[in-house]
Amino acid sequence: MCGIFGVISGQKGSLSGKAIANLLPPLFKLSEKRGREASGLAVCAEGAIQVYKRAGSARAMLKSADYQSFVSRTLLQPALQASSPPETAVIGHSRLVTNGGRGFSENNQPLVTDHCVGIHNGIVVNDQAIKERHGGLDATSDVDSEVIFRLIEANFKTTKSITDAVVNAYQEIEGAASIAFYHDITHTLTLMTNTGSLYVAVNHDAQVLVFASEPSFVQQVLSQCKLTKTLGKFATRKLQPTSGLSIALKSFTLDEISIASSADKPRTSDDGKGTVPALPLQIVDATSPHQMIRRCTRCILPASFPLIEFDDNGVCNQCRDHAPRKLYGKEALQKLADQHRKNNGEPDCIVTLSGGRDSSFGLHYVKNELGLNPIAMTYDWGMVTDLARRNQSRMCARLGVEHIIRSPDISVKRRNIRKNLEAWFRRPDLGAMLPLLTAGDKQFYHYPRQLRKEYDLDLVFFAAGSDLERTVFKTAFCGISKDRHGQILGNFPVIDKFRLVAYFTKQFLLNPRYINTSLFDTLWAFFATYVVKDDFTYLFHYIPWDEDKIMSVLREQYDWEASDDTSSTWRIGDGTAAFYNYVYHTVAGFSEYDTFRSNQIRAGLITRDEALKLVSEENVPRYETMREYASLVGFNLDEALMVINSMPKRF
């Protein structure tokens, strides 16, 4: 089972933040004997509770720069080194995975709910029944542990007593449960066990308490860190089954809890003078961008954006260099359509259709607004989602449009993706990631060219080209500072094409595993994208891209289907997007959504506050889609997320 531990120093406690920080390595190393698959801690100090966790062993975590930075900003701040430091507490967890993959941060501990930050050793065997009984309890993870803290929160709303709330929760759960948790309203740290797997050492004079899952862990830490020598004798005891302690952090008063006797009087605070105001819960997660990341004062691009520069006013170079594109206009588009229009009922153009938002609207626009008779063409390389296929079917059926699909050997394409992913995991690099994962995709430029010859149709529409969807960071990670292609990849300046070739040649030399059966796909994709002349018609070079209008048309006229696992309608037809956006957001602190919303700010379509709110929802990991992606390609998502979450962060 898991190892849990903690250290508390009251308001008049004798431990500085630095002294507590020095206790953590031995506590983690001892506790990881009980589980080495994920590690984490939560620090309660200076009016905040901050959390750090990551997949992997405690020893690996202790060596990481992220951990050192977290400890520095939570326990090594000047206020905690004073002669009389404020009350401080730390709880830690070393996980043995029983359910819920460790690659997902939400499944690792400490767990965070609305008012509890807690750790659990054991298995709740009736968690699903409890969720059904209580309407789900708003659980956000896959682990059984979360239901304990959700139950405690629900009970506290009615009992107003943290001890009664805990007792009531334990009367409902089945299975082993030894827990420790902060409760931000009562400013308490509570220990509870129904198996006796918690051992506590207390020095009341020094106002210091240490607890752990095994007695030897407590004794070794007291001895190794010379706490008995410096602070005096500690009283050590085992918490008996069905018992616990509720510790008021400010006054260091310890209240006994017993499931056998639940007649505790409702308590409101540790001093009896009313409810203590809730502490702000600041969640600092190693797998997520730090909340205090610096962003442009005009848009929302962060300081971790490649090749970004801020002026004295905090405005980034992307904003300063922004020049709105002048659209060709609807009249020019109508004139182009008239030149290719056939009046005999035969097809007069091709529209590429991925099943995503823009391509679906593009098919509607060409058919109903321009009055053309298009053929829809899809290149299905194995990463087109089932949702996208359903939307393709809807659009073509409602519009009465012939749908032509070109598909290679999908099993080969997926195998190539897997080989590139396995190579990338050996030496992950943000610049190298996307082109290698989508090498099989970029041949979609080839098939419209082929189809136009077969049907003798010159006019090919791509429902693309909007400056709002510019994602310049993908080439900026390769060292290309300017966006000079006008949303047409074939229009990259020759010097930039050479830079791309040089960058990827270097990656291949540094990581020869990229030289595999996917190499032909990669080279062909580069040729089809950047070398062959691009003479397609890009719809949004002519008309403005209007999200509200597009979604209104698709939903009202076609019952177009969005994804259940994201609030965004962008990229939902692409099985790869959820994965690579997770990588960008985890490692660099932003994703495609941040660039999209920043472009909207520059265009005057939304405010900066609106953009921040939108990306907070859009950047929520799409775990279900990633699971489906991993299943299709054939790699272990949990192991992949461990690699990603362990990568050095750019923020």
Image (cartoon, grey):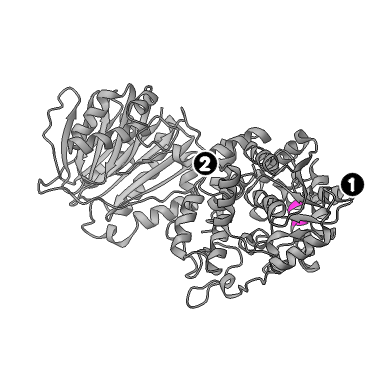
User: Is there a contact, CB below 8 Å, between mark 2 and mark 1?
Assistant: no
Q: Which residue is mark 1?
A: 454
Q: Position of residue 597 (x, y in %)?
A: 54, 60
Q: Which residues are magenta?
A: 504-508
Q: Earlier in the sequence, mark 2 or mark 1?
A: 1
Query: Residue 388 got which mark?
Result: none
- Residue 218 visible in the shown view: no
Q: Position of residue 46 (x, y in %)?
A: 27, 56
Q: Amino acid at mark 1?
A: Glu
Of all residues, the one furthest to the bottom in this rendering is 312
The residue that appears at 53% across and 39% down in the rendered structure is 623
The residue that appears at 18% across and 46% down in the rendered structure is 206
The CA distance from mark 2 to mark 1 is: 39 Å
Q: Is residue 16 left or right of residue 347?
A: left
Q: Which residue is mark 2?
A: 565
Q: Nearer the viewer, residue 153 or 78?
A: 153
Q: Nearer the viewer, mark 2 or mark 1?
A: 1
Q: Nearer the viewer, residue 506 or 449?
A: 449
Q: Is residue 243 left or right of residue 281?
A: left
Indicate whether 407 appears above or below 81: above
The residue that appears at 49% across and 78% down in the rendered structure is 312
- The prevailing secondary structure element of the residues shown in magenta is helix
Q: Position of residue 352 (x, y in %)?
A: 74, 49
Number of marks drawn: 2
